[in-house]
């Protein structure tokens, strides 16, 4: 039995649909670099891959390796691939959002689906951690890049 993804804050299909026109517009300028910050077990990465289809790099980052294993298995089933489009580059990184392993000015869009919210639950270090994550996210954004946050 295949495990299901879980989305805390937003329906991944609706999230992708509401941003698809914007994504297609900026993709006309070249390859789109997208970061899913705290990818978790959301269905969001597979929805992005289904609808954007080509000319993009999707970087899925999570602190928990099991979440990345889940994403690898849910994004690449054989019935998902559409052979009429070049395979997008989808990469997985286990790491800390306070110290992102990417060069600055490289991401067109960073998606935060509650990652910074969850940091605030730590009453002692939460605000400092959130500040560090946001600083890192803005460091990665290229000129005119966007940080899209989905929050409670």
Image (cartoon, helix red, strand yellow):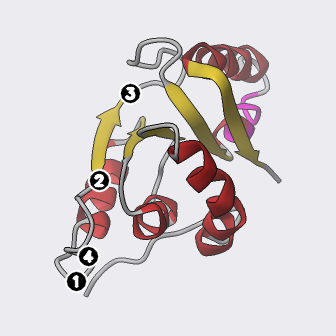
The answer to whether 91 is drawn above or below residue 10 in the figure is: above
Q: Which sits earlier in the primary sequence, circle 3 or circle 1?
A: 1
Task: Report the residue marked by disc 1.
Answer: 79
The residue under the point 71% across, 42% down is 148
Nearer-the-camera pick, 56 or 46: 56
Q: Which sits earlier in the primary sequence, circle 3 or circle 4?
A: 4
Q: Quadrant of residue 57 in the image?
A: top left
Q: Which of marks 3 and 1 is in front?
A: 1
Task: Report the residue marked by disc 2.
Answer: 88
Q: Nearer the viewer, mark 1 or mark 2?
A: 2
In contact (CB < 8 Å): disc 3 and disc 1: no
Q: In this view, does 30 lie to the left or right of 69?
A: right
Label 1 to label 2: alpha-carbon separation: 15 Å
Q: Does the magenta-highlighted stretch encompass residue 119?
A: yes
Residue 16, position as x, y percentages in the image: 61, 64
The answer to whether 7 is drawn above or below residue 29 in the figure is: below
Residue 26, position as x, y percentages in the image: 59, 43
| Element type at mark 4 | loop
Task: Report the residue marked by disc 3.
Answer: 95
Label 4 to label 1: alpha-carbon separation: 8 Å
Task: Report the residue marked by disc 4.
Answer: 82
- The count of marks equals 4
Q: Which sits earlier in the primary sequence, circle 2 or circle 3?
A: 2
Residue 149, position as x, y percentages in the image: 73, 43
The residue under the point 32% across, 34% down is 93
| Element type at mark 1 | loop
Q: What stretch is highlighted in magenta?
A: 117-122
In contact (CB < 8 Å): disc 2 and disc 3: no
The answer to whether 52 is drawn above or below residue 28 in the figure is: below
Q: Specify few, some or many for label 1: CA neighbours under 10 Å numbering under 14, 14-19, or 20 or more.
A: few
């Amino acid at each position: 039995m295949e495990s299901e993804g879980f989305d805390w804050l937003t329906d991944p299909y609706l999230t992708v649909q509401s941003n698809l026109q914007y994504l297609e517009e900026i993709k006309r300028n070249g390859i789109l670099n997208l970061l899913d910050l705290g990818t978790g077990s959301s269905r969001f990465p597979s929805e992005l891959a289904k609808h954007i289809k080509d000319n993009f790099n999707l970087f899925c980052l999570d602190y928990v390796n099991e979440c990345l294993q889940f994403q690898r298995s849910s994004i690449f089933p054989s019935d998902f691939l559409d052979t009429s489009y070049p395979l997008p580059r989808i990469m997985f990184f286990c790491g800390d959002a306070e110290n992102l392993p990417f060069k600055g000015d490289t991401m067109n869009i960073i998606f935060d689906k509650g990652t910074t919210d969850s940091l605030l639950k730590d009453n002692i270090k939460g605000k400092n951690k959130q500040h560090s994550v946001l600083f890192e996210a803005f460091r990665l954004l290229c000129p005119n890049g966007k940080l899209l946050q989905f929050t409670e």
